[in-house]
Amino acid sequence: MQSSRSQRNPDHTRGWILDAYPSRLGEFAVWIISENGERLRFTDSFKPKIYVSGKEEGLERLAAQLPYDRAVVSWDFVRRRAKATDVEESNVLEVVLEDCRRLSSFTRRVLKSGRYLQYDVFNCDLKHEQLYFYDRDVFPLAFLDVKSENGLVKYSLLDSAESVDYAVPPLRISRIDVEVAKQGKIAKTSDPIKKITVNQDGGGEVVDSGDEEYKLLRFVQVIKELDPDIIVTKGGDSYLFVYLVRRAVINGVVDKLVLGREDTPLVARKVRGRTFFSYGRTFYRAPMRRLYGRVHVDERNTFILAECGLDGLFEIARTCRVSLHTAARSSIGSSMSSIQFYQAMKDGVLIPRNKSIPEAFKSAFELLVGDRGGFVYEPEVGVHDDVGEVDFASMYPTVMVNNNISAETVLCKCCPDSKLRIPELGYNICEKKVGIVPKALKPVIAKRLIYKRLKSEAEDERLREVYDNRQTALKWILVTCFGYLGYRNARFGTVDGHIGVCAFGREAFLRASRIAEERGFRIVHGIVDSLWLKKKGATDEEYQKLCNAIREETGIPLSFEGRYNWIVFLPSRMHPNVGVLNRYYGVMESGKIKVRGLEVRRRDTPPFVCNAQTRMLEVLAEAKNSKEFVEKIPEALKVLREYRQKLLNGEVSVWDLIITKHLSKDPKSYKQRVSQVIAAEQLMKEGAEVAAGKNVRFLFTSAENKRPERRVIAEELIEKNTDSDTKKYLLLLYTSAANMFSSFGYSVETVYDAVKGQRQIRLASQ
């Protein structure tokens, strides 16, 4: 049991912001973790402002109607830049609403009154917490001095969102797991609770005695006693909380199912999640199940937590000024856009409901010249010695910052004679003002570079992990910002700017290539922002001097990643003499194994095959050069033979053979009954909810069976006597080796022969 207490409406403290949300009408509840460990709830009066632009007579007519709208507190005419591209401010109507929960309904009324043509509404569709954070100029986990006076909270920041040396409060983290007493093959909300496990800081409790009502009430009591700040679940958004609410309703204790710090019972209406398409992939996001005063994180409904843990989550929340709830679930693009929104509000630019900046007209020739993407050098297929890798650090974001690329700066009206021009197209870029996008990105780039340096200097292993997680989180923001610049819904995006970034990137890449060749390096592969260079006997100092020269020439930082003992560039499966851009593997002098495009990097590879390929790579990693690499291939195939024998002997668990496949669309929309569709149909038949964007996990049982339903079985339906299709998994095993050694003439058939000991391929280098 925690000794610290939760206190409401204190007067003054110093601590960290944990959570903020609308409470009573016109008020915000803010939870602070104080320096002495107390969890304190402050109440702050907050009334949001939105803005309406239009013709003057139309705005006056709208203003005349506002006294009759109960949601409106006050209004006035003010001057603002309604659009980022506006050179001067214009008159707009500023409306103060009594509560941020009135924003959507009021916006609809305004648009409807103008027949959706007369008025543009701004700052109207941001998340409530974001509006609050922007207005008060604070952010989640900010360390500050807090005072409450006459219903208003005053903050004195003792922290900065740009800080890299910040302290995180001592958070209490609970993990909840619920075991269902399944009546059928798949757990349903109609099945009773078997046990509830709560783990926190090595302690906790297992609630498995008494009737179901007692289990629920004891569970609530355990949460109250442990008083966690963060509750982590697996499937809390999609299933677990819905299940708990349903069981509480059946047992008549739903009003007592309180998991937050407020006295509000858990609400989990059965709402379907959202399927969306982004970067060529279909995603599914379950609806948020929010707690108040605590943070709920669903490990199955978060991208950032899987990529960089809680350290990365905290970094995103602080940097982007979004709540921990939102940061855990939102796409990186949504979080990244929050930085731009904050910057726009600081600059006095209104945030539009929709993107309003069209693409400039282009002739067919201009499209051909300008819209070409990044530059690549086709890899030289085979194994190489004396290769070093150099990478541009955050190339496209740096291009955007260095060249002032933003919606309002590209083709600006104020600088038609600007000397700063987009290569090839000649589009002018503003020289009088810095754009919202580069302003927002500059501190992120700077922070990431500092984190990478701190990581390399830190001696403490935990500290290195923290810095690495933080820089990885920022890396995803920087990776996303380029694509988001050309996204159709990006408020401050611009297609012309997106094309310009590619043009500047190509120019920098070609300059770097020229400088490398002038210094005696040969390019064996290059892709957008990375170069693999070959020069016999080249030292680390030579590579570092090359990086410095390229940095001076292009203005973009270049880092030397290291030299390889050997590296293999793999060919296309269809065209053996043509290299594939992102299929290679090698071992650096530091011992680090770098792999792209092999089974170990694929999400749909079963653990058994992944483990086998990993062991083969470890054997090959012992080689110090290409000659030793070739000599190690037979030894690597011995590893394959061992794994083959394990499979034939039945020593491999079916759980190590599970394959994960992604549903790119609704199962009913597939024309072919591929494996993941068959597994999805099996789950749906048992009452499970399956949607586009979700992953389906299954086992091959009889891959070539004429009856599709017998080819695979969904993971949830596997029973003790379920057998796997040995032939299918042997094929996957042989394919993984064939892909590794395809540069040396190996195919699935020849790998099979080699493993069986019938014949060994004679390599060209032997």
Image (cartoon, rainbow, N blue to C red):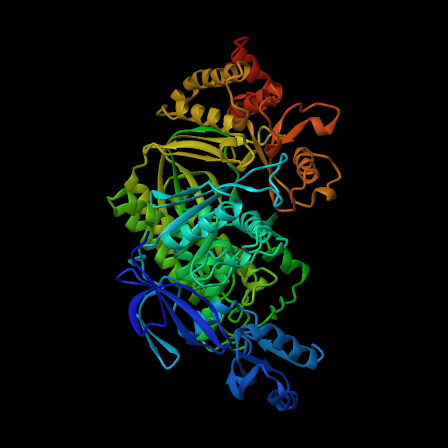
Q: What residue lies at 45% left-to-right and 32% top-to-bottom? A: 585
Q: What residue lies at 35% left-to-right and 57% top-to-bottom? A: 447
Q: What residue lies at 55% left-to-right and 80% top-to-bottom? A: 51
The reply to whether residue 443 is visible in this rendering is: yes
Q: Position of residue 8 (x, y in %)?
A: 37, 69
Residue 229 in the image: above or below residue 526: below
583, 688: nearer the viewer: 688
Residue 707 in the image: above or below residue 152: above
* Residue 389 horizontal side relative to residue 24, left or right: left
Q: Residue furthest top?
A: 758
Tag count: 0
Q: Position of residue 66 (x, y in %)?
A: 61, 87
Residue 51 in the image: above or below residue 688: below
Within the image, what quadrant is residue 747 found in? top right
Quarter of the image that includes the C terminus: top left
147, 490: nearer the viewer: 147
Q: Position of residue 37 (x, y in %)?
A: 29, 60
752, 154: nearer the viewer: 154
Residue 162 in the image: above or below residue 680: below
* Residue 678 horizontal side relative to residue 559, left or right: right
Q: Position of residue 639 (x, y in %)?
A: 45, 18
The reply to whether residue 416 is visible in this rendering is: no
Q: Residue furthest left?
A: 459
